[in-house]
Image (tube, rainbow, N blue to C red):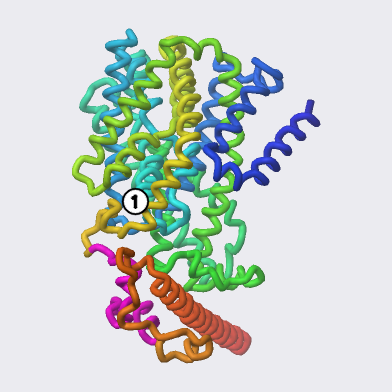
Amino acid sequence: MEALWFLLIGALLVAMALGRGLVARLPLSGAMVYLVVGFLIGPACANLLTVSLDGDVRTLRVVAETGLVVSLMAIGMHLRVPLRDPVWRVPLRLGFPAMFATVLLVAGSGILWGGLAPGPALVLAAALAPTDPVLANELRVKEAGDDEPLRFALSGEGGCNDGSAYPFALVGLALCGWPSLGSERPATFLLAMLWGISGAAAIGWACGAGMVRLVTWLRTRFGEAVGLEGFLAIGLMGLCYGAALLAHTYAFVAVFVAGVALRHEELDATGEQTPSEALADVERSHKHEAATSPELAHAYMAESMMAFAVEIERIVELGLMLLIGSIISAHWRELLDWHAIWPALFLLFIARPAGSVVALWGSTFDRQQRTLIAWLGIRGVGALYYLLFGLEHSRYATRPLAPVILATIVLSVFLHGCSATPALRRYMGRYMRTPACETGRESGNAPRPPLGEAMYRIPSLPDSTRGRQMRDLASSPIRRSRRVPIIPDKPSVTPGVHADQTPDVRRVARRVKEHADLVERADRRRRVEVRRRTLRRQWDCDTEAARQYG
């Protein structure tokens, strides 16, 4: 049996690694594959993995909880945008007002048409309303610093609403007979809820920012605490989540905020340059120098921790979806009842779109973006967690909800898995051809001009470091050595073709960007070398003084 398990997991991991490109091109997702495999190895087929909701619910809840913690930290570290940027408005709207509207609709439908009592109806709504951060990793931003509005909104929503659904679950369980903090009176519960959110945010920010400042201080001043970023990532998750639980706050919110705080510290230290660009010239043999460099320490730490969290998240997704598939394999007959299917359809086609309409009211998102947000609300591990949480504390009242929640997970995984890739491919194709002012990028600044218009004349660029470097390229030795033509004042434009789509503008813009990157890299190498030599001289002086006077 052990040999069979090793073969099965090894073959699945290798197959997904080799077929990653194929899965990305097809209307398919990794979660769909894992769910099917979990069903096949479950009690209904091979009976290799026997997991049931009638067994050890606490162990399953802890496993699901751990997966959510890892995923929330990874999402937070991806969102590299200043907190005052208006692009944060839509994720916050989706995470709180849209969540509240979806909970009301799902709970109301359960009471009116499902015959549920208010307590179980609220638990059901708390489980189904939040989108899933674990399975939505294919919808999130591609890298730290990516502020594409649709992906950023979906990523931020996945980080916010798993924590914002927690008070509704507590109210539902309190109505089912399980008392929680402040549930005796509405006023005390409201205060407990306010403390749960604000306290979690404060704890998460303190843990995330404090971890970055402590580690970078040790690295840049003393050359200590270098390496083991995986230990730091898991340690930060555990410290933040444990401290939030001890303080009786909503720990999911704390973990997400800790990831955002870690990335915000890196943003303050690195500036507008993305971490991938800052670390582009760092060779593998020079990782130690980058980790201890004052200019690169924050970027190196944040990128290393995020890469580790993403890899762990993929493994967690595989394990959790196999467990969910096995659970569905044990209870598949209950999922065929119409009373388990119609609430899932109501959520996906009515409640979620209605909640997104409330959240996006007055935003600058266009019709396609609003449609995608209304549809791409995948459910998965988060719904399973709240189901297990309810079963752990009030099994008799929440056990009838299991078929509904499991049916919703199955429908969401397959419907969203099949439709997300083609829909996002069409959207991104349009987004890359459209100026930012027309794609829902909420900003108080003037709209960005298209690339071709911005490159007509180099002196029209903003007075920034990059702008000055690009203006100097026309007479630079780099340009003469590479024989790059000077940018013309008025590039030829074919009638009926947008300026930034003409070949000469694209070619010149690409070459200007390449040479600007060369100048930036040379300047970074020079600054890092000067800093290294300065620190070395200071170290030698201190050592000599200690030898003479010590």
Residue that label 1 marks: 149
Residue at 40 percent across and 40 percent down: it is: 158
Q: Which quarter of the image is occupied by the C terminus?
A: bottom right
Q: Amino acid at mark 1?
A: Pro
Q: Does residue 26 show up?
A: yes
Q: Nearer the viewer, residue 542 or 285?
A: 285
Residue at 32 percent across and 44 percent down: it is: 369
Residue at 44 percent across and 27 percent down: it is: 383
Q: Is residue 489 above or below residue 401?
A: below
Residue 179 location, x and y as percent? 35, 19
Residue 25 location, x and y as percent? 55, 45
Question: What are the residue bounds of the magenta stretch?
Answer: 447-472
Say whether residue 306 is magenta. no
Q: Is residue 194 above or below residue 225?
A: above
Residue 375 location, x and y as percent? 37, 34
* Rendering quarter of residue 354: top left
Q: Does residue 531 show up?
A: no
Q: Is residue 410 above or below residue 31?
A: above
> Is 192 placed left or right of 144 in the picture?
left
* Rendering quarter of residue 454: bottom left
Q: Nearer the viewer, residue 332 or 368?
A: 368
- Outermost residue, top direction? 115
